[in-house]
Amino acid sequence: MHPAYRSSTQISVPRGARVLLVAAMVFTSTVSLATAQSDATPLPGATPVAGAGISSEPFGESDGQPVERYTLTNANGMQVSILTYGATVQSIMAPDRDGTIANVALGFDNLDDYVTRSPYFGSIVGRYANRIANGQFTLEGETYELAINNEPNTLHGGNKGFDKQIWAATEVENEDGPALQLSYTSPDGEEGYPGTLEVSVTYTLTGNNELRIDYTATTDAPTVVNLSNHTYFNLAGEGSGNVYDHELQLNTSNFTPVDETLIPTGEIAPVAGTAFDFTSQRPIGEGIRDASDEQIMIGLGYDHNFVLDREGPDDTSMIEAARVTDPASGRVMTVTTTEPGVQFYSGNFLNGAFGGPSGVAYRQGDGFCLETQHFPDSPNQPDFPTTELRPDEEFTSTTVYAFSTD
Ligand code: GLA
């Protein structure tokens, strides 16, 4: 047991103290933010872009239900496209050090691929992101049986998790730039989870080239919640090969080792001196072939929860979790979060069976995920920060993916 997590609490606030999203106005059609907000002014050196704001278009149908694609554009010309299917980040168009724009998120250009083969590309994963051992947990004396979709465990919410639901979208303008709020009501008993869960995820594209994700959830009965975004990044551009030359730094002195089914053993182990030591920047590929590291062998690379270096169990302040640099393009991404952990996944299961918009097949290591989250299997691990949510609480969580160049 790690002392930092002896008596930890869920990131939640009493209903009365809710921090409300600063939503100034609600738009029903394309809006222009080019002149509307001071924070939406371009970064120094950037040319203001006409058409900054939000646009939307149909993106096919799933189960007879229409799916929309929304595109957020900021004053620098950076664009993020989001699907109502899975509240999915479909593409992130970001400049390199010469100003050349590329899509740094793996994904598909059609809905059918998302429905039939997506390994959670860009999606919101829930009700419980990551794994719960044997698809089972006990809460207030009641044992719940969940869908087993990753033998012998449940993964990312079960057979039809939040990544496969169609979310209701509302265009909002908050003080930092164009934003899209996506809402979903998960019925009591869905995939085995108790309580009706009202979930909201707001994506904001700020004038500082940040993609901010604000999550909230409330329940009408005790339940467990762990929400994350599952974007696979390649800062050289999707379809450009593997990410092993990307330099990664994680502000994590410890990680949670796993058993052969990728369930944490309960240990919080120091990374020092191992392939898991990213406390100083190092290439993703440097330790990935370290066959002497049992954890690398189990994960087929990195597929582990890293424990953020926080002040203590109640520290839910926004801290930098990760910094990734692609030396070739100069693109840099930082990840800042309120969450206690981050799952670093090196795209180990991408096997070349499908490709993305560039027409290039995705193979092992062609993207990486930094899924900010609570630790896997927390409902069965009393010493991990709790993921329980009760009707008098509100779950809140924020993660910012910030893009720049060096
Ligand atoms: C998560 C898991 C991985 C894998 C991917 C999706 O990152 O930890 O093991 O299931 O999702 O393929």
Image: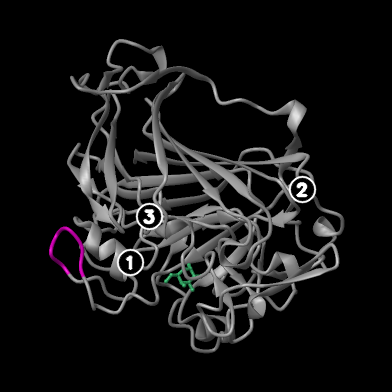
Question: What label sits on residue 390 in the rendered view?
Answer: 2
How far apart marks 2 and 1 lie (CA) works out to 32 Å
In this view, 27 is above or below 386: above
- Magenta stretch, residue numbers: 355-360
Quadrant housing residue 406? top left
Residue type at mark 3: give it: Gly
Query: Given the current orientation, which residue lies at the most extreme left position?
Result: 359
Q: Which residue is mark 1?
A: 118
Question: What label sits on residue 122 in the rendered view?
Answer: 3
Quadrant housing residue 350? bottom left
Q: Is residue 355 left or right of residue 249?
A: left
Residue type at mark 2: give it: Arg
In front of the other: 254 or 106: 106
Q: Is residue 342 left or right of residue 365?
A: right
Question: Callout 1 environment at 10 Å: few (<14), some (14 to 19), or many (20+)?
Answer: some
Q: Secondary structure at mark 3?
A: loop
Give yes or no for residue 359 being in the magenta stretch: yes
Q: Residue, x 31% and y 57% (percent of image)?
A: 234
How many numbered circles are shown?
3
